[in-house]
């Protein structure tokens, strides 16, 4: 999770920003700021608290749980709104799978899991750990992609359709991965 989050918020976010704004600042300082996003900082704080066996007050844990429980529904509302706007403008024709979405699905469900599997073989990673690595590499497009695309003026519709179709396809692909990996 930390590796995926770090890559997304450094390389991925810079790529989305460059697509939308035509430029993206990609210096070491900017990359470190993006890598140490709020998500990663919170994970590091929680790991430190667990290792130090410090229990935060119940009020703090309740508030953070409530806020954390809101993040996924809010990002899904944003992505759903983008899909609704596509449907409103183009009808069902706007929602069909196009060549670009097929390319995204090929990358997400074939190329990335294959690379992860080969890296696991190279480093002798087996069992449940290998299964988790391969599954994580073959997950659908993240909702944050749609949000950042909208924020930076990139192709939000493309990101929303990629999110939608990879999520639909994952209902078949993830059980298939589990069957193949045993």
Image: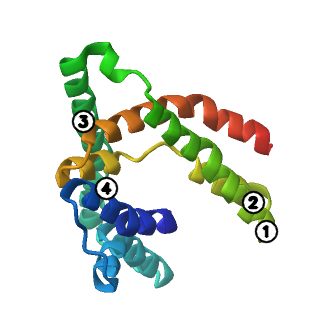
Identify the mark at residue 77; answer none if there is no mark: 3
Residue bearing mark 1: 122
The Cα atoms of the two marked residues, 2 and 4, are separated by: 37 Å
Q: CA distance from mark 2 to mark 1?
A: 6 Å
Label 3 environment density (alpha carbons within 10 Å; few <14, some 14–19, many ≥20): few
| Proximity of marks 1 and 3: CB atoms separated by less than 8 Å | no
Q: Looking at the rendered structure, which numbered label has been put on residue 118? A: 2
The residue sitting at 40% across, 80% down in the picture is 54
Considering depth in this image, is 27 or 38 the residue closer to the camera? 27
Q: Nearer the viewer, mark 4 or mark 3?
A: 3
* Quadrant of residue 13 within the rendered picture: bottom left
Under circle 2, the secondary element is helix
In this rendering, would 32 be left or right of 21? right
**Which of the two residues, 150 or 125, is positioned nearer the viewer here?**
150
Judging depth in this view, the residue of 151 and 130 nearest the camera is 151
Q: Quadrant of the C terminus?
A: top right
6 w.r.t. 139: above or below: below
Which residue is at 38% across, 61% downward? Answer: 12
Q: Residue furthest top?
A: 92
Counting residues from the start of the chain, the first of labels 2 and 4 encountered is 4
Q: Nearer the viewer, residue 122 or 125?
A: 122
Q: Nearer the viewer, mark 1 or mark 3?
A: 1
**N-term-proximal mark, 1 vs 3:** 3
Separation (CA) of disc 4 from disc 3: 19 Å
Residues under numbered marks 2 and 1 in contact, where contact means CB atoms less than 8 Å apart: yes
Q: Residue 121 occupies which quadrant of the picture?
A: bottom right
Q: What is the spatial separation of the Cα atoms under label 2 and label 3, in whole angstroms?
A: 36 Å
Q: Point out the tag, 4 or 3, that comes first from the N-terminus.
A: 4
Lower sequence index among marks 2 and 3: 3
Residue drawn at point x = 65 percent, y = 50 percent: 113
């Amino acid at each position: 999770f930390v590796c995926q989050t770090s890559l997304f918020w450094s390389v991925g976010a810079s790529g989305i920003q460059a697509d939308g704004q035509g430029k993206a600042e990609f210096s070491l300082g900017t990359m470190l700021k993006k890598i140490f996003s709020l998500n990663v900082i919170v994970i590091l704080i929680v790991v430190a608290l667990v290792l130090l066996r410090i229990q935060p007050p119940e009020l703090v844990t309740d508030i953070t749980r409530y806020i954390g429980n809101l993040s996924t529904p809010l990002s899904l509302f944003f992505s759903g709104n983008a899909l609704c706007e596509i449907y409103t403008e183009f009808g069902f024709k706007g929602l069909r799978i196009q060549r670009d979405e097929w390319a995204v699905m090929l990358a997400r469900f074939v190329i990335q899991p294959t690379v992860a599997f080969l890296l696991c073989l190279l480093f002798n990673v087996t069992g449940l750990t290998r299964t988790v690595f391969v599954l994580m590499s073959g997950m659908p497009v993240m909702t944050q992609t749609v949000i950042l695309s909208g924020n930076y003026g990139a192709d939000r519709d493309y990101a929303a359709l990629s999110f939608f179709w990879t999520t639909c396809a994952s209902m078949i692909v993830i059980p298939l991965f589990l069957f193949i990996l045993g």
